[in-house]
Amino acid sequence: MRDGKKERATEPLRHVFGPVGSGRLGVSLGLDLLGARICSFDCLYCEAGVTEALTTARKPYVPARRLLDELAAWKAAGHAPPDVVTLGGLGEPCLNSELGAVIAGAKELFPDLPVAVLTNSSLMADPDVRLELAQADIVLPSMDTLVPAEYHRLNRPHAAVGLTAIRQGLLDFRAAYDGKIFLEVLLLAGINDSVENSELLQGFCRELAPDRVDVVTLSRPGAHPGCQAASAEALARFRAALGGFAQDAAAPRRAEGHGPAALAGPQLEALAGRIAASVARRPQTEAGLAAGLDVPAAHVRLALAALVRAKAVRERREGDAVFYSGLAG
């Protein structure tokens, strides 16, 4: 008779994904708090795809209990522990009104790991959001531009989200928060790589005093056509202005396997499920998946081939790299 507990543990999880390799966090186990492309922004560059519901309404889109049950199941399956548990996913995680309960529950399940939250900063003006976020060990907010025209063109925000309120909300959060803040600025050529923006962000960072600033550009396909990566000169200029802490991306971790032995059917299906769930959140390469999931590249290649044949994922070449994404990605 099969062990029912083990069988359940290998089933693909709907809201836990990865682990994936992160340039800022190492090996990150992701938790999707929205379950769909629900966001307060519809950014040109978003790796999750076009926003399906543009909103600022906070609701328990995925209940905390369901998220934490999946996280507990992932832990019980005996996977190698990640470096960090990261709340993010397909949309803006702070829209989930049970954010605080999810952070607290993740810290109980993984008391030795930091809990991080990715956010576009759009809800930082809300005192309740700031209070819930303060439970996290690391907060990774975005601030791509402080030039209003650039902000509307690049981030395509909900009408209720004002740039001035975001700026002040981040400063208010910093004043009351003892954890780490890793600020991200994503540049696109001809959109927010202006001298005006670099000067405004320089003054802002002087006030915010983040623990780290990452200035990056496109490395994966964006949500909307026409996005162009910023030039090396623009990246260098912004990094110099904002403290020089940033890097394009960390070198991918090499997955240490035990040879390219063929996967048996159930194991292949389980790995394919994990890969499909992961690339549904963001496009990734074969090497990136192997590093993030900590499995041999040969196994990832087999699972990807099966997924492509079944038309369950999309294969797309960008320059010299091949990315895999969900069909709606």
Image (cartoon, rainbow, N blue to C red):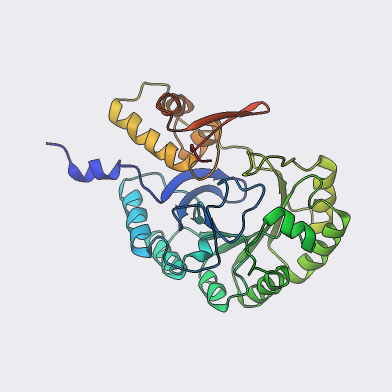
Residue visible at 67% across and 57% down in the picture: 156
Residue 167 spot, x, y in % from top left: 71, 70
- In front here: 54 or 211? 54
- In front here: 61 or 204? 61
Q: Residue furthest right?
A: 195
165 sits left or right of 197 in the view = left
Residue visible at 46% across and 44% down in the picture: 18
Residue 179 spot, x, y in % from top left: 59, 68
Q: Which residue lies furthest to the left in this view?
A: 1
The quadrant of the rendering that contains the N terminus is top left
3 sits left or right of 107 in the view = left
Residue 213 spot, x, y in % from top left: 71, 57
The total of numbered circles placed on residues is 0
127 sits left or right of 155 in the view = left
Residue 229 spot, x, y in % from top left: 74, 41
- Position of 293 relative to 175 (above/below): above
The reply to whether residue 31 is visible in this rendering is: yes
The reply to whether residue 146 is visible in this rendering is: no
- Position of 248 relative to 129 (above/below): above
273 sits left or right of 23 in the view = left
